[in-house]
Image (spheres, rainbow, N blue to C red):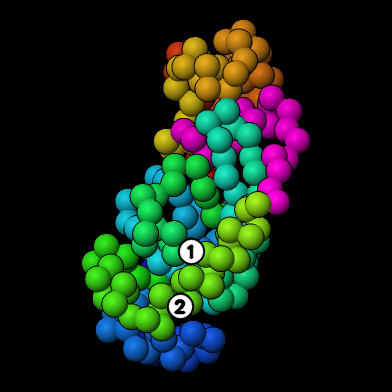
Amino acid sequence: MEKIYDKKKIADCIAKSRYHAVLDSLDIDFYLIKYEKGELVSSPFQRDLLFQIVEQGSINICLIRDDGTRYSLSNGTTDYFLGDMDIFYPRSGNIYAEAAESLICISFPIEKNRDLLLSNSGFLELVCRSLSAKIGTMTAIDAAPASLTERVLSYMKYKCADETLKGIEKAAFHLHCSARQLQRILNQCETDGLVKKTGKGTYRLLSAEG
Protein backbone atom coordinates (compact mmCIF):
# COMPACT_ATOMS: atom_id res chain seq x y z
CA MET A 1 0.00 0.00 0.00
CA GLU A 2 1.23 3.47 -0.91
CA LYS A 3 -0.38 6.78 0.06
CA ILE A 4 -0.02 9.58 -2.49
CA TYR A 5 -0.32 13.22 -1.43
CA ASP A 6 0.77 14.87 -4.70
CA LYS A 7 -1.86 17.59 -5.19
CA LYS A 8 -1.70 17.51 -8.99
CA LYS A 9 -2.20 13.75 -9.14
CA ILE A 10 -5.09 14.01 -6.69
CA ALA A 11 -6.72 16.84 -8.66
CA ASP A 12 -6.33 14.93 -11.93
CA CYS A 13 -7.88 11.83 -10.40
CA ILE A 14 -10.85 13.75 -8.99
CA ALA A 15 -11.38 15.55 -12.30
CA LYS A 16 -11.71 12.17 -14.04
CA SER A 17 -14.16 10.82 -11.45
CA ARG A 18 -17.85 10.68 -12.33
CA TYR A 19 -18.40 12.12 -8.85
CA HIS A 20 -16.15 15.15 -9.38
CA ALA A 21 -18.95 17.68 -8.84
CA VAL A 22 -19.79 16.29 -5.40
CA LEU A 23 -16.15 15.77 -4.44
CA ASP A 24 -15.36 19.37 -5.39
CA SER A 25 -18.14 20.52 -3.04
CA LEU A 26 -16.52 18.81 -0.06
CA ASP A 27 -13.91 20.75 1.91
CA ILE A 28 -11.78 17.68 2.53
CA ASP A 29 -8.08 16.88 2.24
CA PHE A 30 -8.18 13.98 -0.19
CA TYR A 31 -5.30 11.63 -0.89
CA LEU A 32 -4.78 8.62 -3.12
CA ILE A 33 -3.97 5.09 -2.02
CA LYS A 34 -2.33 2.61 -4.35
CA TYR A 35 -2.74 -1.11 -3.61
CA GLU A 36 -1.04 -4.08 -5.19
CA LYS A 37 -2.92 -7.20 -6.24
CA GLY A 38 -3.88 -9.29 -3.21
CA GLU A 39 -3.64 -6.49 -0.66
CA LEU A 40 -6.57 -5.91 1.68
CA VAL A 41 -8.21 -2.60 0.85
CA SER A 42 -10.69 -2.74 3.69
CA SER A 43 -10.77 -5.06 6.70
CA PRO A 44 -11.65 -5.10 10.41
CA PHE A 45 -7.91 -4.98 11.21
CA GLN A 46 -7.47 -1.49 9.77
CA ARG A 47 -7.07 1.28 12.31
CA ASP A 48 -8.35 4.14 10.17
CA LEU A 49 -11.97 4.25 9.04
CA LEU A 50 -11.70 5.35 5.40
CA PHE A 51 -14.10 6.29 2.64
CA GLN A 52 -12.57 5.14 -0.64
CA ILE A 53 -13.64 5.45 -4.26
CA VAL A 54 -12.11 3.06 -6.77
CA GLU A 55 -10.63 5.07 -9.64
CA GLN A 56 -8.43 2.46 -11.30
CA GLY A 57 -8.46 -1.32 -11.03
CA SER A 58 -10.93 -3.66 -9.35
CA ILE A 59 -11.67 -5.28 -6.00
CA ASN A 60 -13.37 -8.37 -4.64
CA ILE A 61 -15.66 -7.92 -1.64
CA CYS A 62 -16.45 -10.93 0.52
CA LEU A 63 -17.86 -11.86 3.89
CA ILE A 64 -15.80 -14.27 5.99
CA ARG A 65 -17.57 -15.90 8.90
CA ASP A 66 -15.72 -17.02 12.02
CA ASP A 67 -15.60 -20.61 10.75
CA GLY A 68 -13.77 -19.54 7.58
CA THR A 69 -16.84 -19.88 5.35
CA ARG A 70 -16.54 -17.39 2.51
CA TYR A 71 -19.40 -15.50 0.87
CA SER A 72 -18.70 -13.48 -2.27
CA LEU A 73 -20.64 -10.23 -1.96
CA SER A 74 -19.66 -8.38 -5.12
CA ASN A 75 -16.91 -7.16 -7.39
CA GLY A 76 -16.09 -3.47 -7.52
CA THR A 77 -14.54 -1.55 -10.39
CA THR A 78 -14.18 2.15 -11.22
CA ASP A 79 -16.51 4.39 -9.16
CA TYR A 80 -17.20 1.71 -6.51
CA PHE A 81 -17.56 3.01 -2.93
CA LEU A 82 -15.89 1.52 0.13
CA GLY A 83 -16.76 2.80 3.59
CA ASP A 84 -20.27 3.98 2.76
CA MET A 85 -21.83 1.68 5.38
CA ASP A 86 -19.25 2.77 7.94
CA ILE A 87 -20.68 6.30 7.89
CA PHE A 88 -23.89 5.04 9.52
CA TYR A 89 -23.11 1.70 11.17
CA PRO A 90 -20.32 0.21 13.32
CA ARG A 91 -17.68 -1.47 11.21
CA SER A 92 -18.47 -5.07 10.34
CA GLY A 93 -16.06 -7.65 11.67
CA ASN A 94 -16.67 -9.97 8.74
CA ILE A 95 -16.50 -7.93 5.51
CA TYR A 96 -13.25 -7.65 3.54
CA ALA A 97 -12.26 -5.98 0.28
CA GLU A 98 -9.20 -7.25 -1.58
CA ALA A 99 -7.45 -5.77 -4.60
CA ALA A 100 -8.04 -8.03 -7.60
CA GLU A 101 -5.33 -6.14 -9.50
CA SER A 102 -3.28 -2.98 -9.12
CA LEU A 103 -5.68 -0.47 -7.62
CA ILE A 104 -5.91 3.29 -7.01
CA CYS A 105 -8.53 4.85 -4.72
CA ILE A 106 -9.48 8.41 -3.84
CA SER A 107 -9.53 8.34 -0.04
CA PHE A 108 -10.26 10.37 3.07
CA PRO A 109 -10.89 9.59 6.77
CA ILE A 110 -14.53 9.26 7.82
CA GLU A 111 -14.41 10.21 11.50
CA LYS A 112 -12.68 13.54 10.91
CA ASN A 113 -15.23 14.50 8.23
CA ARG A 114 -18.41 12.77 9.43
CA ASP A 115 -20.41 15.94 10.20
CA LEU A 116 -19.43 17.49 6.88
CA LEU A 117 -20.45 14.36 4.99
CA LEU A 118 -23.81 14.10 6.75
CA SER A 119 -24.64 17.71 5.92
CA ASN A 120 -23.93 17.38 2.19
CA SER A 121 -27.10 16.31 0.37
CA GLY A 122 -25.29 15.53 -2.88
CA PHE A 123 -22.88 13.18 -1.13
CA LEU A 124 -25.70 11.48 0.83
CA GLU A 125 -27.60 10.89 -2.40
CA LEU A 126 -24.59 9.09 -3.88
CA VAL A 127 -24.18 6.99 -0.75
CA CYS A 128 -27.87 6.02 -0.71
CA ARG A 129 -27.65 4.83 -4.32
CA SER A 130 -24.53 2.82 -3.48
CA LEU A 131 -26.08 1.19 -0.41
CA SER A 132 -29.29 0.34 -2.28
CA ALA A 133 -27.30 -1.45 -4.97
CA LYS A 134 -25.29 -3.39 -2.36
CA ILE A 135 -28.40 -4.46 -0.47
CA GLY A 136 -29.88 -5.76 -3.71
CA THR A 137 -26.75 -7.79 -4.37
CA MET A 138 -26.54 -9.23 -0.86
CA THR A 139 -30.05 -10.72 -1.02
CA ALA A 140 -28.80 -13.27 -3.53
CA ILE A 141 -25.49 -14.33 -1.96
CA ASP A 142 -24.70 -17.90 -1.07
CA ALA A 143 -21.71 -19.52 0.54
CA ALA A 144 -19.02 -20.72 -1.81
CA PRO A 145 -18.42 -24.47 -1.34
CA ALA A 146 -15.20 -24.98 0.57
CA SER A 147 -13.26 -27.86 2.03
CA LEU A 148 -12.04 -27.71 5.62
CA THR A 149 -8.53 -26.99 4.33
CA GLU A 150 -9.83 -24.01 2.35
CA ARG A 151 -11.71 -22.76 5.40
CA VAL A 152 -8.59 -23.10 7.58
CA LEU A 153 -6.53 -21.03 5.14
CA SER A 154 -9.33 -18.48 4.82
CA TYR A 155 -9.62 -18.30 8.60
CA MET A 156 -5.88 -17.68 8.93
CA LYS A 157 -5.82 -14.99 6.25
CA TYR A 158 -8.88 -13.04 7.28
CA LYS A 159 -9.55 -13.82 10.94
CA CYS A 160 -6.09 -14.13 12.49
CA ALA A 161 -3.97 -11.08 13.28
CA ASP A 162 -0.82 -11.04 11.11
CA GLU A 163 -2.24 -14.13 9.34
CA THR A 164 -1.01 -16.20 12.28
CA LEU A 165 -3.10 -18.91 13.94
CA LYS A 166 -2.41 -19.18 17.67
CA GLY A 167 -3.98 -21.98 19.68
CA ILE A 168 -5.22 -25.19 18.06
CA GLU A 169 -8.14 -25.76 20.44
CA LYS A 170 -9.48 -22.21 20.10
CA ALA A 171 -9.20 -22.24 16.31
CA ALA A 172 -10.81 -25.68 16.07
CA PHE A 173 -13.80 -24.38 18.03
CA HIS A 174 -14.34 -21.54 15.54
CA LEU A 175 -13.82 -23.84 12.57
CA HIS A 176 -16.30 -26.44 13.89
CA CYS A 177 -13.83 -29.29 13.69
CA SER A 178 -11.80 -31.32 16.14
CA ALA A 179 -8.34 -30.24 17.27
CA ARG A 180 -7.01 -33.48 15.74
CA GLN A 181 -8.54 -32.64 12.35
CA LEU A 182 -7.11 -29.13 12.45
CA GLN A 183 -3.65 -30.35 13.44
CA ARG A 184 -3.66 -32.86 10.59
CA ILE A 185 -4.60 -30.15 8.10
CA LEU A 186 -1.95 -27.75 9.42
CA ASN A 187 0.68 -30.49 9.19
CA GLN A 188 -0.28 -31.13 5.56
CA CYS A 189 -0.31 -27.41 4.76
CA GLU A 190 3.17 -27.12 6.25
CA THR A 191 4.34 -30.03 4.08
CA ASP A 192 2.79 -28.32 1.04
CA GLY A 193 4.59 -25.07 1.83
CA LEU A 194 1.43 -23.10 2.61
CA VAL A 195 2.08 -22.41 6.29
CA LYS A 196 5.04 -22.32 8.64
CA LYS A 197 5.08 -23.47 12.26
CA THR A 198 6.57 -20.68 14.38
CA GLY A 199 5.90 -22.07 17.85
CA LYS A 200 3.75 -24.45 19.85
CA GLY A 201 0.26 -24.37 18.33
CA THR A 202 1.26 -21.36 16.23
CA TYR A 203 1.24 -21.30 12.43
CA ARG A 204 1.73 -18.44 9.97
CA LEU A 205 0.71 -18.22 6.33
CA LEU A 206 3.86 -18.08 4.23
CA SER A 207 2.26 -15.44 2.03
CA ALA A 208 2.33 -13.12 5.06
CA GLU A 209 6.12 -13.25 5.13
CA GLY A 210 6.41 -11.72 1.66
Q: Position of residue 16 (x, y in %)?
A: 52, 89
Does residue 144 belong to the magenta stretch? yes
Question: What's under tag 1, amino acid-wise?
Answer: Leu
Most foreground residue, 141 or 58:
141
Say which label, 2 or 1, has the lower sequence index: 1
Q: Residue at x 52, y 16 (%)?
A: 173
Q: Which residue is mark 1?
A: 82
**Circle 2/circle 1 CB separation < 8 Å:** no
Q: Residue at x 40, y 66 (%)?
A: 51
Q: Which residue is mark 2?
A: 125
Magenta-colored span: 140-160
Q: Which of the 4 quarters of the picture holds residue 176?
A: top right
* Most distant residue in the top direction: 180
Q: Is residue 133 above or below residue 209?
A: below
Q: Is residue 46 visible?
A: no
Q: Is residue 100 left or right of residue 7?
A: right
Q: How many marks?
A: 2
Question: What's under tag 2, amino acid-wise?
Answer: Glu
Q: Which of the 4 quarters of the picture holds residue 191?
A: top right
Q: Residue at x 40, y 79 (%)?
A: 123
Most foreground residue, 22 or 15:
22
